[in-house]
Image: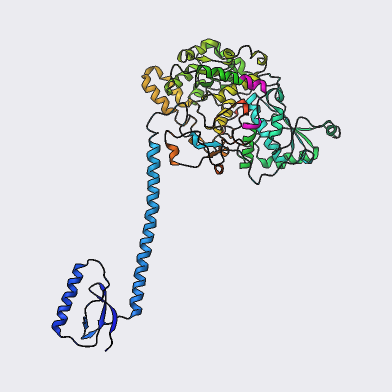
Amino acid sequence: MGVAKAWRYTGGVLVLAKNHHHHHNHKSNNLKQKNQQHLLSRHHHCLLWQPLDTEAAVGGQRRRISWTVVCGVLLFVLGLISFFTGHVASDLEWYSHRLVKRRLWTHKVVRFSPGPVDIWKSKFSKFYYGCSERSPYYAPPARQMLSNGYLLIAASGGLNQQRTGITDAVVVARILNATLVIPELDHHSYWKDDSDFANIFDVDWFISFLANDVPVVTRVPDKYMRSLEKPPYTMRVPRKSEPRFYLDEVLPILLRRRVLQLTKFDYRLSSDLDEELQRLRCRVNYHALRFTKPIQNLGQKIVMEMRKMATRFIAIHLRFEPDMLAFSGCYYGGGDKERFELGEIRKRWVTLPETSPDGERKRGKCPLTPHEVGLMLRALGFENNTYLYVASGEIYGGDETLKPLRELFPNFYTKEMLASEELQPFLPYSSQLAAIDYIVCDESDVFVTNNNGNMAKILAGRRRYMGHKRTIRPNAKKLNALFFKREKIPWETFAKKVKAAQQGFLGEPDEMKTGRGEFHEYPSTCICKKPFKFSDLDSNYNANQTLTKSSFNPEAETEYGRNEEDQGVQIIVDGGGVVEEKGGVNFLSD
């Protein structure tokens, strides 16, 4: 008769059996079963084959399995195999990629970490660049005659304190949709400098660079002033006011009076703003505020003189002038003479509270002496033949105070030593002298601050924006304890402890954290990461490797990246304690 075929399960193996509808003797069946068992023993994996004619008797009857059940089981098993093997494979692939990436990163980064820190340059600075471009949704400014009125600004303090005020004034004009009049500088501060904005900054550049942000004019038109019924309204806003305050309290007055003056404008705007306004701050501070040609030229001449003597140099802002020491309330061992002299200067700020000199020093509030600055640098690894440029005014104690620093670093220079004749026209103007120091400090390979004043903060932020150039700020609280027991411990131990104390105070990119300190010192919104590549970690990687266009190339010649004319410098890319307020007195030290 015909042959019937069916899938059946025997001994854990699916086999295809034939049914010929005729009988075999028992011996023949036994022989065939033995042959089948021998075949199974030779194959240790599942087989599908057509066996010899067999008869699986269950109660004397052959057991058949329908095609529907067999196909269902096969599809289910194959589906499970496919699902689990595919899922496991994908997981294994994902975990393997992650493990390999982590091991490669650890291997390459750890290659740098055990060794000594490069005291001249951060190995990781090449992974970041300054970015202050406008977003595609940035609204164009209103035209001068269509704005909400004219905003007059009276800045306050020394050069860098006024610089922060000018920067914030542009942002406030943007918030109020106002036309900004070139700010008026402070002529009545401690420094008694009669310089105007145009004597220090390039006015034409300032106006043209900010044309796409706010309208800026040199003065309110006379015709407009004559049409006013009342003189300009004058007011002073609270420190660190939010944009909402300007919209709720200042804007109505501006709309009503049309000309408004904000006085003593320093740190009158919150440090925490939205991204567009923060980037506007960066465009103003790092690009629009460019020094005049005479200041630029002299600053560059001094830089060139330093470069002739050494391929790299350190610039130190000592800030050890009498006014700074008097305001700090610190004592430096000068006896009754020092106490009397600094005490007389301190009387200028009648509301300053009494302080404990020892307590202030333990809290890290006292500037280091020039000798202590030198000891810190030598402990960090700078050698005796390192070239120093010292930016400062009148050092309290004069040459006697500077003598220990000169002994530690004989290659010691100041602007007076390098450009005595060219400096003569600038001598009556402290802000212009500070601008010259600013340029040299900005161009230095390493910048060392000695206090938390305005110049230190402004330059620290700028150097971060311009490529995280090495900037060292003393960890005074820990260092003072080390200086106190300096004579009792070996130099090697002292140097090791200084290096440990200065971790996190060397200007490394990882010190930049959103919300840390004042924005002028930590402009985190304006610092961008370059796309990560493992090859970037190789020691032979070219730090000047160009970025792709999609990576916002910081070397590209755009108005937002590194401006080759900014401050007359040509570069190859490579807590909120701004204001000391004691007893209601605000003193910002440049």
Looking at the image, can residue 389 be seen?
A: no
Q: In this view, does 11 lie to the left or right of 189?
A: left
Residue 552 percent across, percent down from the top left: 57, 41
Please state the extent of the stretch shown in magenta in the rendering: 286-298
What residue appears at the point 15 percent right and 82 percent down from the top-left corner? 28
Q: Nearer the viewer, residue 316 or 341?
A: 316
Q: Nearer the viewer, residue 174 or 332?
A: 174
Q: In which quarter of the image is the C terminus?
A: top right
Q: In which quarter of the image is the N terminus?
A: bottom left
Examine the image and state in which quarter residue 103 appears.
top left
Residue 565 percent across, percent down from the top left: 63, 28
What residue appears at the point 73 percent right and 39 percent down from the top-left corner? 250
Examine the image and state in which quarter residue 528 appears.
top right
Q: Residue 289: say if magenta.
A: yes
Residue 205 percent across, percent down from the top left: 69, 30
401 to 264, vertically: above or below: above
259 to 435, vertically: above or below: below
132 to 409, vertically: above or below: below
Looking at the image, can residue 252 be seen?
A: yes
